[in-house]
Structure formats: C-alpha cells, structure tokens
Image (spheres, helix red, strand yellow):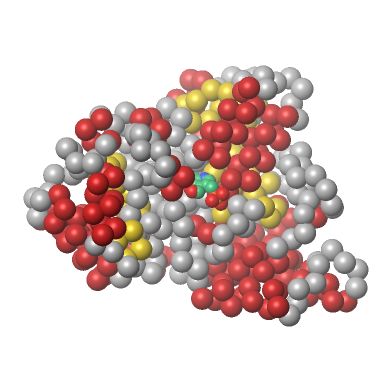
Amino acid sequence: MIYADNAATTRMDLAAYHAMQSWLQVEYGNASQPYSYARKPKQALANAREIIAACINAQPDEIYFTSGGTESDNWVIKSSAFSDPDHRETITTAFEHHAVLNSCAVIERLGYPVSYLMPDESGKVLPEALRAKITDRTRLVSVMFANNEIGSIQPIRELCSVAHEHGALFHTDAVQAVGHVKIDVKELGVDFLSSSAHKFNGPKGIGFLYIRNGADLLPYMDGGAQEKKHRAGTENIAAISGMAEALKGNCEYMEQNEEHIRGLETMILNALSAAGVRFQRNGGDYTLPGLMSLSFPGFSGEAILHRMDLMGICISTGSACDSVNTEISHVLRAINLEDSLATGTVRISLGKFNTVEDAARISESLIRIVK
Ligand code: PLP
C-alpha cells in the first residue's frame, strides 16, 4: 500500500512511539499527585512544553495541551465569544475546517455575530478583504494557516496586523502547517494558534493551543486545576511526550523533509504533464509541501480515488472529515472552482516517508486511470 493522504493523518515517527511507551507501562503516575512517583511524569510535561514552545518560538507557559485541533479551535472560537458581554463580531473565512466553521455556527445561533471572508480563486485570503470587513466592533479574527484541502498558505502576519490595528485578537488554525513549515509565533504576532500531533507524525488525540501571554482565554474544559486551571483533565503524558518528540524531529529536519517532499511533488506533476494529461492544480503558488489538489476535467474525483485504492494507493477527494459527503466541498465552492473541475478533484498529500518509487507509482496509476 502506498499512503498518500498525509493531510488526513500521518504515520507516527518511531522515536515518538518509543518516547510514549514507558509512560503507559512503567511511569504511569498521575502528574498532579504530590508523591515522588509523580515527579517523572510532571517533569515529562515540563520537558514537552519546553520542546514544543521552542519549535514555534513561544514561551513554555504559552502552550496548553488539548485533545487535538478540533478542541483547540472550539476553545478559541467559543471561549472568545462567550467571554464578551458586548457580543462583538468574530470574522473567519468560508473555507476553514469544520472545527472552526461549526464552532462559529454555534456561537451565531447563540447571538454572537460571525462574518465570513472569501478567499480569492487561488485560495488566498487577502489582507484587503479583511480590511474591508473589519470594524472596531470585531473581537476575534480566525484565519487558517494553510488550507487542508488545497494547501494554500495564508499571509498570516499581514492579516494579524490588520486585526491588531482594529483592536481585535487573532487566531490561526495551523493544524496542517505545524511541523511542516517554519512557524514563529512572535514573528507572526498571533494571539492563538491551534495544532494537532497526528498531522506531524505524532499520536492521535493530542494537540496543543498556543495562547500568547496576556491574551487570556476563558477555560473551555472545567474540572481540575491542570494547565493552569485552563484545561481540566488528567494529562495524557504518553501522548504529550510522543507529540513533543515528533515535533522536535520534524522541526530538526524540516528543510530536508521539505526538499524531499517537494521533489516528489515535482516528479508527479512533471510525469502527468509529460503524458499529456489535462489537469489543473488548485491552491496557487504557495502551498504546503506535498499537498496537491488536482482537478481532472470531465472525471469523477471519487471514481479516481476508488480506482487508485484498487491499485493500492490511498488518496482523498477532499478533507478526511468530508469522506461521507460526496457533494462538492465548501473549500472548492469558496474558491469558485467550476463544477466540472470540482467534481474531478482529488487531493494527494505526500509525507516524509514517501519515496521516489511511491511518486512514480502514483503518477503511473493516475495516468493509466485518466488516459
Ligand atoms: N483543522 C484543520 C485545518 C485540519 O486539517 C484538521 C484535521 O483534519 C483539524 C483542524 C482537526 O484536527 P484533529 O483531527 O486533531 O481534531
């Protein structure tokens, strides 16, 4: 099997896997207890926080562990709205992940206004579009770092400056980007950043939220005093340690991984062009390494996916969360892709474990299907 759906999830790093084991079987103490058996898990938490903070240039006490991207997004959107007695507006985009969009739908139903920016046809949210919509009654702006279906990377620093000029806070869902492209929260200026370990070769069900010191957010999960009383629940030390190890590895080899993955990407695109295949790549010029949204006019993306599956290759038509929904995705709608292209769209997302042989088989199989 060739796995080319790394935007849905990734294979765990061996080092991350090993980093998890002793916390499950040997050092399984609860980090919140006062006795000495809790010392090692407590230290592991502190170490993980430090490693993760260093990877995104944050302070360790700005990292809050969560169950993943969905929880981090829910936390920011809902807690930001619910702590505002003035019901000021939230601005987001029409092509966010459903963790953001459905959280926004909830706050809207409860009377907190939300408005939606449209990306341009290349999948970019322009700072001018935000400038045209934002007012001094905007509380939060939330724009994803990189889109999960088409890979387009957003001008986060510029968007964040526009938000701050108007006194609004800025959140970015960086689930697809962390561990794959350089992220420096101080340089970007963001107040909140969501991340998820299983997208960067860490375990599933664990992630973090960066909350800039000074940009306080109401707790989302109520209960015990964990995470400075901001996110209750016994910490999953094994998953947290695995996440930190995976992120450290990906950040250490980020340039090499990117070069390798972009090389495979070019191989596939060149092979399709050389074979005379008619296709369009979506997402503009600045995309996540390895994430290719390809539209084959006149074909069915779903049929291509299933033919590829029969050939032992995993790709996707859109985001994993949309796999039960065969309609044209909200992302392709948002970039205004015409129907004949949208229905013939597949997402191939390569990762660091993919090889030149994988790229060759992916392109050969695609060519065989569409020719
Ligand atoms: N945000 C984006 C952009 C994603 O791609 C995903 C997962 O597909 C999520 C949020 C949800 O993350 P998790 O699976 O950790 O809940």
How far across and down, in percent of the image, does residue 214 sit?
75, 42
Q: Position of residue 27 (x, y in %)?
A: 75, 77
Quarter of the image where the N terminus is located: bottom left
Given residues 94 and 204, the one toward you in this image is 204
Q: Quadrant of residue 59?
A: bottom right
Towards the viewer: 128 or 369: 369
Residue 266: name its quadrant.
Answer: bottom left
User: Residue at point 50% right, 65% down?
Assistant: 201
Question: In percent of the image, x 70 and y 78: which residue is there?
Answer: 25
Q: Quarter-wise, where is residue 56 in the image?
A: bottom right
Left or right, residue 167 beside residue 263:
right
Report whether residue 12 is seen: yes
Q: Is residue 160 at all visible to an observer of this figure?
A: no
Name the residue rendered at 88%, 76% in the picture: 36
Q: Residue at x 54, y 76 (%)?
A: 15
| Residue 191 relative to residue 224: left or right | left
Give the number of callouts: 0
